[in-house]
Image (cartoon, rainbow, N blue to C red):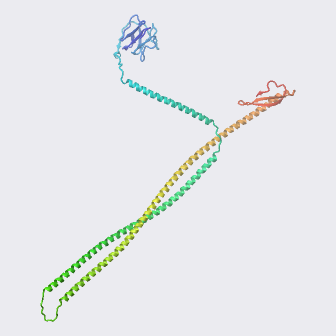
């Protein structure tokens, strides 16, 4: 605190527990510094501070004041010296008294002024950020300038296009022709769509016919395969029977050869027995036994039996063989015909499959063409509708412009008619005024030519009139 020209500097905070704190540090021409509170001295200027909350009490004093402490709620004034404050407190001499003073010890602790090691890096980062922000700001400024230039250019173009007079053009025949062309195109697309639909129906009918034929051929093929399987089973049975018959024939041939060898052995044994044995038989009869003839007869009989058996077996086996051979030939011919029919059916099936695939591909192509035609028709119709709407809108706009121009023309005509009426009225007034001025001057005859400026408030027209008169004073031009 300063009183007069003294300075007060304090590093301590003075806080009073009572409602009033009286501090004094008056010195004429010297600096007063304290770290504690001191009481008032007699004979010196005493400053009494009333409690005031919120701001420092030492504002607006005459001399410099510096302090790190904040006096809580003090308003100062002086009666003998000029201490100023906005609210102007009361000050006066008071008797010396001792006031209770409390000191804030935390304010006496020295400040920690150590340097942060990361402060330089933080400052560098802040500088880089500021540089980047400055660059961005400069770019934004350039962009704003460019946009302003573009805006001015567009405004100039807009003014130019607004001031440019539109020429009258009759576009209705052109639009009508274009609409008629689009209508014909739409009709042609609809006709093509109907034709393609009929072709698609025809192709579908042909495809159904081919499907039925294919199903019939598949049924015939299945029947032929079943017949082939049955004939093959019969042929297998015939081959099995043929093998059985061949085995039986072979066993019979072996049996015949065995019996033949057996009979030959028996004959040989009998002949040996007969040759080794001599039998004398005395009989009363006179007949003579001829063993050779008997053996020959027996041999011939057995040979006949064997030959007949062999012939019968050979004939039976030959008949069976011929029958089996004929059956095999017949079944082989049937099998060959069946194979040929199967091959023919396979060729027909392949041909029908190729035709069906071709029909399917044609059907898919036709469907794709139909869908593409429908899409193109839809696109064309949409484009035609859009263009028709645009043309109708342009036509409506042209009609509106024409109506506006007609209204303006009517207004101009009405203005012209009013101006013509006003001009005629002024002309009649001028002629009447001229007659009024000419009538008194009929005594002297002279030729004069004058001009009368006439017109309304906005336009001025000079009319030259001829009059005959004498004694016209002033200028010959008169504004009416």
Q: Nearer the viewer, residue 21 or 303?
A: 303
Tell me if residue 298 can be seen: yes
Which residue is located at x 49 percent, y 30 percent? 139
Instruction: Indicate the position of residue 80 as horizontal and vertical percent values.
Output: 45, 7
**Left or right placement of residue 146 versus residue 477 in this view:** left
Q: Nearer the viewer, residue 266 or 195?
A: 266
For the C terminus, give its image quadrant.
Answer: top right
Whether residue 242 is situated above or below residue 105 in the rendered picture: below
Instruction: Indicate the position of residue 273 as horizontal and vertical percent values.
Output: 14, 84
For the N terminus, give its image quadrant.
Answer: top left
Whether residue 200 is situated above or below residue 128 in the rendered picture: below
**Left or right placement of residue 42 versus residue 408 in this view:** left
Which residue is located at x 45 percent, y 61 percent? 354
Which residue is located at x 53 percent, y 32 percent? 146
Q: Nearer the viewer, residue 403 or 335?
A: 335
Tell me if residue 71 can be seen: no
**Left or right placement of residue 379 versus residue 400 in this view:** left
Based on the displayed image, in which of its 4 quarters is residue 291 positioned? bottom left
């Amino acid at each position: 605190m300063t009183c007069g020209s003294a300075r007060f500097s304090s590093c301590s905070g003075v806080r009073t527990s009572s409602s009033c704190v009286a501090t004094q540090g008056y010195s004429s021409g010297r600096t007063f510094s304290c770290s504690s509170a001191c009481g008032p001295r007699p004979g010196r200027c005493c400053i009494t501070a009333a409690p005031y909350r919120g701001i420092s009490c030492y504002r607006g004093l005459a001399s410099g004041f510096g302090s790190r402490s904040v006096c809580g709620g003090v308003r100062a004034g002086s009666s003998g010296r000029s201490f100023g404050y906005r609210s102007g407190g009361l000050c006066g001499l008071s008797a010396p008294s001792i006031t209770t003073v409390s000191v804030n010890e935390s304010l006496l602790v020295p400040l920690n002024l150590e340097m942060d090691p990361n402060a330089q890096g933080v400052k560098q980062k802040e500088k880089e950020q500021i540089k980047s922000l400055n660059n961005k700001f400069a770019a934004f400024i350039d962009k704003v300038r460019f946009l302003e230039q573009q805006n001015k250019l567009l405004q100039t173009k807009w003014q130019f296009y607004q001031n440019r007079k539109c020429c009258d053009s009759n576009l209705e025949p052109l639009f009508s022709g274009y609409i008629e062309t689009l209508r014909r195109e739409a009709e042609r697309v609809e006709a093509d769509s109907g034709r393609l639909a009929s072709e698609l129906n025809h192709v579908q009918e042909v495809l159904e016919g081919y499907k039925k034929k294919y199903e019939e051929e598949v049924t015939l093929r299945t029947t032929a395969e079943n017949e082939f399987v049955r004939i093959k089973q019969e042929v297998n049975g015939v081959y099995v029977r043929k093998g059985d018959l061949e085995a039986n024939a072979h066993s019979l041939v072996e049996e015949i050869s065995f019996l033949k060898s057996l009979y030959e052995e028996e004959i040989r044994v009998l002949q040996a027995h007969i040759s080794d044995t001599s039998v004398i038989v005395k009989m009363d009869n006179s007949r003579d036994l001829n063993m050779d003839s008997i053996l020959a007869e027996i041999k011939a009989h057995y040979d006949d039996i064997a030959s007949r058996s062999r012939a019968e077996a050979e004939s039976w086996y030959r008949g069976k063989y011929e029958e089996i051979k004929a059956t095999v030939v017949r079944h082989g011919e049937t099998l060959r015909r069946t194979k040929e029919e199967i091959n023919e059916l396979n060729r027909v099936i392949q041909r029908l499959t190729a035709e069906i695939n071709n029909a399917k591909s044609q059907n898919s192509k036709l469907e794709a063409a139909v869908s593409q035609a429908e899409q193109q028709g839809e696109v064309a119709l949409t484009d035609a509708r859009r263009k028709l709407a645009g043309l109708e809108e342009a036509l409506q706009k042209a009609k509106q412009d024409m109506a506006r121009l007609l209204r303006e023309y009517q207004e101009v005509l009405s203005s012209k008619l009013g101006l013509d009426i006003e001009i005629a009225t002024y002309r009649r007034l001028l002629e009447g005024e001229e007659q009024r001025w000419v009538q008194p001057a009929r005594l002297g005859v002279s030729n004069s030519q004058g001009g009368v400026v006439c017109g309304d408030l906005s336009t001025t027209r000079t009319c030259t009139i001829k009059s005959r008169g004498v004694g016209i004073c002033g200028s010959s031009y008169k504004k009416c």
